[in-house]
C-alpha cells in the first residue's frame, strides 16, 4: 500500500505541474468568452424568439445579467487559480465545479446566451488532455455531457437557436480536436527526444568504458616497455654479476654492476615519464600538460624547455594526448641523439590551423639513418590521427625543428 500511495502522489504531482503550466492561458481564454458574453448581451435586440417550452428565458434586466456574467467569470477564475486543490483529491471535482458554475449562470441569462458554456467546454477538454495519460474516456464523457446540454438548450429554447448554437459547438469541438492532435504530436516528439537522449547516454557510457579499457591497455603496454623490461634486464645483469663473483672475476663483475646501474637509472627515468603522462591526462589544457612534461624532462634528463604557447585552441582529451606524446617523443630524440640540453616549444594559431614546433640547437639528427630507431614513424602516425602533418627539418651543426600542423577543430574521437 505505501508503494501505491507513493506512485499516486507522483502522478498527482505531475498533474499539478501540467495544470500550473496551462492555468494562466485557460484563465485568459475564459476571460475572452466573458467579454464576448458582454458584447452579445449589450448588442442583442431579441431578434430570435424562443420557440421551445420557455416563452421567456429570464425575467431579470440586462444590468443584472451582466452582474451574473461577472460573478460567473470571477468564480471560474477562482476555480482555475485554486485548481490544484481539486486535482489533489480528484480532477473530476474540478470539471464538475466549472460546469456547474456556467450552467447556473446560463440559466439566469437570456436564451441567446449559452456562450459561457460554449467557452467552458474547450477549457475542460484541454484540462483533460493535459491531466490524463489516457484522455479518451474522459473526452467521450465530456462529449456526452455537451450533447445533453445542447439537447436541453434546444428543448427549452427551440430548434432554430439550437442549430445556431450547434455551429459554435462544432467549431469549438474542432479546436479541441486540433489541440488534442497537436498535443499528441508534441508528446511523440518529446518521447523521440527522450529516447535519443537515452541512446546517446548509452553510447557515451560505452565510449567511456571503451576509452578506459584502451587507457588501461596503454598503461599496461607502457609499463611493460619500461618498468618490466628494465627490471628483467636488471635481474639478468645481477645474475651474471653473481656468477662472475662466484668465479672470482671481480673486474668483470664491477663492469656489469656499472651497466646494471645505468639500466636501472634509464628504467627509473622512463617510469617517471610514464607516470607523468598518466598524470597529464587529467589536465584539460595543452599548456598544463606540456608544463608537466617539460618539468619531468628537466628532472630526469636535465633538459631545459622553454614554452612559448599563444592562442592555443580548445582540444579534446584524445587530441591533447596525441599532441603531448609527439612533443615527448621529439624531446626524447633531443636527449638521446643530440649534444644539447636546451629546447624551445612554440605554438600558435593561424587561419584555423594550429602550428606547434619543437626546436633544438644541437648538432642535428640524421633523420634517414635514425628512422625506425627513435619513434619518428610513431610521430607521423599520431599526426595523421590528428588530421595534421608532421615535418622534420634537420640542419647539421645547427639543430632540428619538428613541426606539427593540425586543424583547430575539437574532436572527441580520433
Image (cartoon, rainbow, N blue to C red):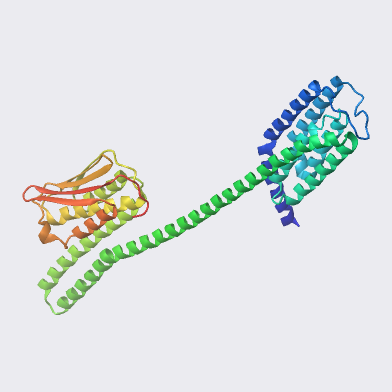
Q: Is residue 128 visible?
A: yes
Q: Is residue 327 visible?
A: no
Instruction: Give the residue displayed 16% in from the left and 68% down from the top.
Output: 257
Q: Quadrant of residue 242?
A: bottom left
Using residue 267 as the reference point, say whether residue 213 is left or right of it: right
Q: Quadrant of residue 121?
A: top right
Quarter occupied by the C terminus: bottom left
User: In front: 200, or 140?
Assistant: 140
In the displayed structure, 244 sits above or below 109; it is below
Residue 112's x, y, as percent? 83, 29
User: In front: 275, or 328?
Assistant: 328
Instruction: Give the residue displayed 22% in from the left and 70% down from the top.
Output: 233
User: In front: 265, or 159?
Assistant: 159
User: In front: 412, or 329?
Assistant: 412
Residue at the outermost left position: 397
Residue at the outermost bottom position: 247
Residue 190's x, y, as percent? 58, 48
Amino acid at each position: 500500500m505505501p508503494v501505491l500511495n507513493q506512485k499516486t502522489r507522483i502522478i498527482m504531482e505531475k498533474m499539478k505541474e501540467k495544470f500550473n503550466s496551462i492555468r494562466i492561458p485557460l484563465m485568459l481564454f475564459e476571460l475572452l468568452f466573458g467579454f464576448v458574453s458582454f458584447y452579445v448581451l449589450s448588442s442583442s435586440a431579441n431578434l430570435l424568439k424562443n420557440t421551445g417550452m420557455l416563452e421567456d428565458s429570464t425575467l431579470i434586466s440586462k444590468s443584472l445579467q451582466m452582474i451574473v456574467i461577472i460573478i460567473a467569470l470571477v468564480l471560474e477564475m477562482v476555480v482555475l487559480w485554486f485548481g490544484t486543490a481539486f486535482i489533489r483529491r480528484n480532477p473530476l471535482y474540478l470539471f464538475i465545479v466549472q460546469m456547474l458554475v456556467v450552467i447556473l449562470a446560463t440559466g439566469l441569462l437570456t436564451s441567446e446566451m449559452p456562450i459561457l458554456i460554449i467557452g467552458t467546454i474547450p477549457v475542460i477538454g484541454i484540462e483533460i488532455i493535459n491531466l490524463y495519460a489516457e484522455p479518451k474516456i474522459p473526452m467521450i464523457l465530456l462529449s456526452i455531457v455537451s450533447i445533453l446540454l445542447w439537447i436541453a438548450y434546444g428543448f427549452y429554447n427551440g430548434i432554430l437557436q439550437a442549430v445556431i448554437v450547434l455551429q459554435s459547438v462544432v467549431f469549438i469541438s474542432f479546436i479541441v480536436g486540433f489541440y488534442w492532435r497537436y498535443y499528441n504530436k508534441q508528446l511523440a516528439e518529446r518521447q523521440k527526444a527522450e529516447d535519443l537522449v537515452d541512446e546517446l547516454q548509452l553510447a557515451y557510457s560505452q565510449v567511456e568504458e571503451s576509452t578506459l579499457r584502451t587507457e588501461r591497455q596503454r598503461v599496461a603496454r607502457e609499463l611493460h616497455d619500461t618498468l618490466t623490461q628494465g627490471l628483467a634486464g636488471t635481474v639478468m645483469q645481477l645474475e651474471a654479476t653473481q656468477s662472475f663473483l662466484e668465479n672470482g672475476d671481480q673486474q668483470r663483475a664491477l663492469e656489469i654492476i656499472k651497466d646494471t646501474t645505468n639500466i636501472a637509472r634509464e628504467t627509473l627515468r622512463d617510469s617517471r615519464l610514464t607516470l607523468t603522462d598518466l598524470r597529464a591526462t587529467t589536465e584539460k589544457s595543452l599548456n598544463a600538460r606540456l608544463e608537466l612534461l617539460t618539468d619531468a624532462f628537466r628532472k630526469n634528463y636535465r633538459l631545459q624547455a622553454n614554452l612559448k604557447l599563444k592562442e592555443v585552441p580548445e582540444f579534446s582529451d584524445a587530441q591533447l594526448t596525441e599532441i603531448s606524446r609527439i612533443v615527448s617523443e621529439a624531446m626524447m630524440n633531443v636527449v638521446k641523439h643530440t649534444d644539447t640540453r636546451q629546447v624551445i616549444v612554440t605554438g600558435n594559431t593561424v587561419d584555423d590551423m594550429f602550428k606547434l614546433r619543437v626546436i633544438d640547437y644541437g648538432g642535428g639528427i640524421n633523420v634517414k639513418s635514425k628512422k625506425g630507431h627513435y619513434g619518428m614513424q610513431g610521430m607521423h602516425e599520431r599526426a595523421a590521427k590528428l588530421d595534421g602533418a608532421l615535418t622534420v627539418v634537420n640542419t647539421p651543426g645547427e639543430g632540428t625543428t619538428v613541426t606539427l600542423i593540425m586543424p583547430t577543430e575539437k574532436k572527441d574521437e580520433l
